[in-house]
Amino acid sequence: MKFADLHLHTFFSDGTFSPEELAGHGARLGFAALALTDHDSVEGCARMAAACDAAGMEFIAGTELTAEYNDTELHLLGYFLDTQNQKLLTEIAKFQSVRQNRIREMVTRLNELNVPLEVGSVFALANCKSPGRPHVARALVKAGFCRTNDEAFERFLKKNRPAWVPKAKMSALEGVELIHQAGGVAVMAHPGLNRTDEIIPALVEAGLDGIECFHTKHSTNAAERYLEIADKHHLLVTGGSDCHGFSKGKPLIGTVKLPYEHVEKLKAKAGKRKPRSGAVAAPSRN
Ligand code: AMP
Ligand code: ZN
Ligand code: FE
Ligand code: FE
């Protein structure tokens, strides 16, 4: 049996592994294919592609976008993206800048709470264009203001906690369109975490291609429910560990093994959307 992990983060967003380390873990675990899905970034894809190639694994370029539909937050995974697509890169840059400003605001709030964390220490620790709350948590631990990342989230960073700042999100419909115009396939990430079941039909209407049925935080029951939903709406099925390296305890890669047949279906859909670069679509016979 061949397996894939289609949900992975590196230090180009809030994971702790380099692309090479992540590919090394994937190879040791026997994966046939890996997808990189850093938050609002495709920057790690070139290095990850090279590392996967060297290890004899297939690589799928992806990203994870934070979006909203009718005030419901959802995460959109894009797969088989053209990582040079100008509109994709422009939009991603915009959301990276939103992320950086949000870090500044969260640190200002912490300072007002008499936690003298320096914003420079967060950016130095994050050392990427797509910083997020896990970086603030790690900076709080490193500076001795919290004992653990969990404590940092519980006291300050979780939704509605005193240093939490809402994040400007793109509309889900624009997110799906952004992924499509970059040649990609659009998938709703971990629906079991965002409680997004009610909005699935509207997103299907807008062109959503798949849902992530298998995820570390989905129970067997949840996975089965989403397989049924995928079947009902003719959606592709994906799965991944959402490994962030050591950012959230121990590395999760290996906890989810998506049968490779699903990768083939994703690939077929991506192939229909965009002729491979340089290739000219063959004229149909009839
Ligand atoms: P952000 O994109 O800045 O909103 O941060 C989202 C990241 O923070 C995701 O990787 C989440 O898994 C992580 N996260 C969210 N809530 C918590 C929590 N309570 N404890 C640890 N990590 C969390
Ligand atoms: Zn993350
Ligand atoms: Fe997510
Ligand atoms: Fe993720």
Image (tube, helix red, strand yellow):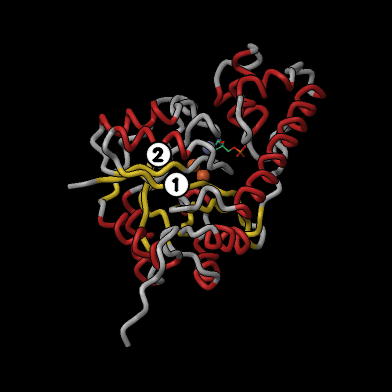
Q: Residue at x 63, y 56 (%)?
A: 68
Q: Is residue 242 left or right of residue 92?
A: left
Q: Residue at x 54, y 51 (%)?
A: 75
Q: Residues within 10 Å of mark 1 (few under 14, many from 20)?
A: many
**Residue 274 position within the rendered picture, expressed as x and y whole percent measured from the top left:** 45, 64
Query: Marks 2 and 1, how far apart in space?
Result: 8 Å
Q: Is residue 122 left or right of residue 13?
A: right
Q: Identity of the amino acid at label 1?
A: Ala
In this rendered view, identify the residue nearer to me: 55 or 280.
280
Q: Residue at x 47, y 40 (%)?
A: 45
Residue farthest to the bottom, as pictured: 286
Quarter the C terminus occupies: bottom left
Q: Which mark is residue 49?
A: 2
- As helix, strand or loop, the secondary structure at mark 1 comes to strand
**Residue 11 position within the rendered picture, expressed as x and y whole percent measured from the top left:** 52, 29
Q: Is residue 118 above or below residue 52?
A: above
Mark 1 and mark 2 in contact (Cβ < 8 Å)?
A: yes
Q: Identity of the amino acid at label 2?
A: Ala
Residue farthest to the top, as pictured: 144
The response on whether ligand 4 sits within 8 Å of label 2 is no
The answer to which of marks 2 and 1 sits earlier in the sequence is 2
Q: Which residue is mark 1?
A: 61
Residue farthest to the right, as pictured: 112
Q: Residue at x 43, y 53 (%)?
A: 80
Q: Which mark is residue 284?
A: none
The quarter of the picture where residue 111 lies is top right
The quarter of the picture where residue 157 lies is top right
Q: Is residue 175 above or below residue 242?
A: below
In this rendered view, identify the residue nearer to me: 85 or 121.
85
- As helix, strand or loop, the secondary structure at mark 2 comes to helix
Q: Is residue 112 above or below residue 57?
A: above
**Residue 26 position within the rendered picture, expressed as x and y whole percent measured from the top left:** 31, 34
